[in-house]
Image (cartoon, rainbow, N blue to C red):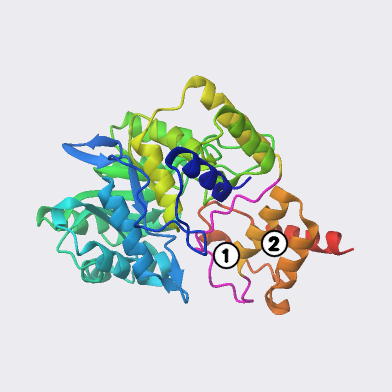
Amino acid sequence: MNRRQFLKSALFTTIGAIVLSASKKVTAETKKVIGKVYTKKFKNLDISAIGFGLMRLPTKLGDPDVSATQAMVDYAMEHGINYYDTAWFYHGGKSELTAGKVLKKYPRNSYYLADKLPLSRLTGKDSVLEFFNEQLNRCQVDYFDFYLAHCINESEWKTVKEYNIYEQLSQKKKEGKIKYLGFSFHATPELLEEVISTYEWDFVQLPINLIDWEKTDSSGWYGVNAKKQYEIVTKAGIPVVVMNPLKGGQLSTLNSKAVELLKRENPEASPSSWSLRYVASLENVFCVLSGMTEMEHMVDNVNTFINFKPLTEKEQKILSNAIAVYKSSGAITCTYCKYCDGCPIGIDIPKNFNIYNEYKSDNKKDKFIAAYEGIKEENRPDKCISCGICKPKCPQKLDIPNLLKEVSDLYKKLKG
């Protein structure tokens, strides 16, 4: 049973008849949940414990669907979600523009907007403020509540120091153009310790989920050692925003065996609600970002955080067992962030990993073969030339060329 099936069951049971559109999306006019979401303290602010990550917005003809996004934001605002997170790279640069359009109907002091400096796009010291000012224009705001150096890793850390980025952004903070300054991080605990000891940060955004909680396990999955990173920043007294709490949606769907374990304990709870509750239960986390694509995702998340309860010890064990079952399937830990875009062969890397993971979840041979053959022959994974351009771009540190070979090998095996 996938997330959509769980959501449909839960919503009909707890709220009664819900009007669904032809595409099974829940309409904004349907009022399913009453109340405001749970909030947590950041400094003297009350921040909604669930934030709207504007990375996976509904689309229309390839671009963000402003009307559908507006409906989701309206629902979010109505139910107390006040933290919105965007970035230069999201939706090919159009997430920021969309944020500006959908939030401008609300008073500026009624929400908190987070944006990020695209470190990999900078060309010199002067480009820092050029990007910053353009982002203000795109978002149609005079200041950012939360502003981050985006995706610090070994390479981008050198950029931060070389271009005096912290110093320049600190000046913007003094001018009131930035209220709180932080960074998002995709690297080792050792580098994290260096970053937080070099400068004074107001907050940090970390990828935290149960798949990545430990560094590695017997299944050989790569993990970012989120537990160690969380402990480092917590010891330093730096509050945390969580990104990637559902591992790019993998923890929303899992597989049938894993879902059955969760369903047995709570038939009405969606798989994603379990994982969101887990990370929101961490004491030093003040907001958990969810990249919601459809209204039903918004409704489910709002329901989870209006009725928020930390996971019990028993529930944590059940969730850990379910994730262990899912990991044993051999799915690839791709989060569909698309940072690997730009393959010279034109391979859609996340798409290939997605159809592979779907097979690992449902074992539907014909479905996998059809999806694979639906890809243009010249863009299939067996055409990978192992140039390695994609590897350093991947925040999950996946060995993409070898994993693409696994996808193509699976096709050859199933095709016979």
- Labelled pair 2, 1 in contact (Cβ < 8 Å): no
Residue shown at 44%/64% (left/top)? 58
Q: How much space separates mark 2 and mark 1, taking CA atoms?
A: 11 Å
* In this picture, residue 237 sits left or right of residue 142: right
Q: Of residues 34 and 184, which is closer to you in this image?
A: 34
In the rendered structure, find residue 390 and report the number of the disc placed on it: 1
Q: With 51 as the anchor, is 46 left or right in this view?
A: left
| Position above or below: 119 against 183 | below
Sequence-first tag of 2 and 1: 1
Residue located at (39% from left, 28% from top): 309
Residue depicted at x 16% and y 36%: 44
Is 169 rendered above or below residue 264? Answer: below
| Residue 98 position in % (x across, y down) | 32, 68
Residue 296 visible in the picture: yes
The answer to which of 191 and 213 lies nearer the viewer is: 213
Q: Quadrant of residue 132?
A: bottom left
> Which residue sits at x=47%, y=22%?
312
SS under mark 1: loop
For the view shown, which residue lies furthest in the top direction? Answer: 313
- Label ID, residue 404: 2
Residue 348 image offset from top left, x and y in percent: 61, 69
- What's drawn in magenta, residue-wise? 330-347
Residue 345 rendering spot, x and y as whole percentages: 64, 76
Packing grade of label 2 (10 A; few <14, some 14-19, many >=20) is many
* Helix, strand or loop for disc 2: helix
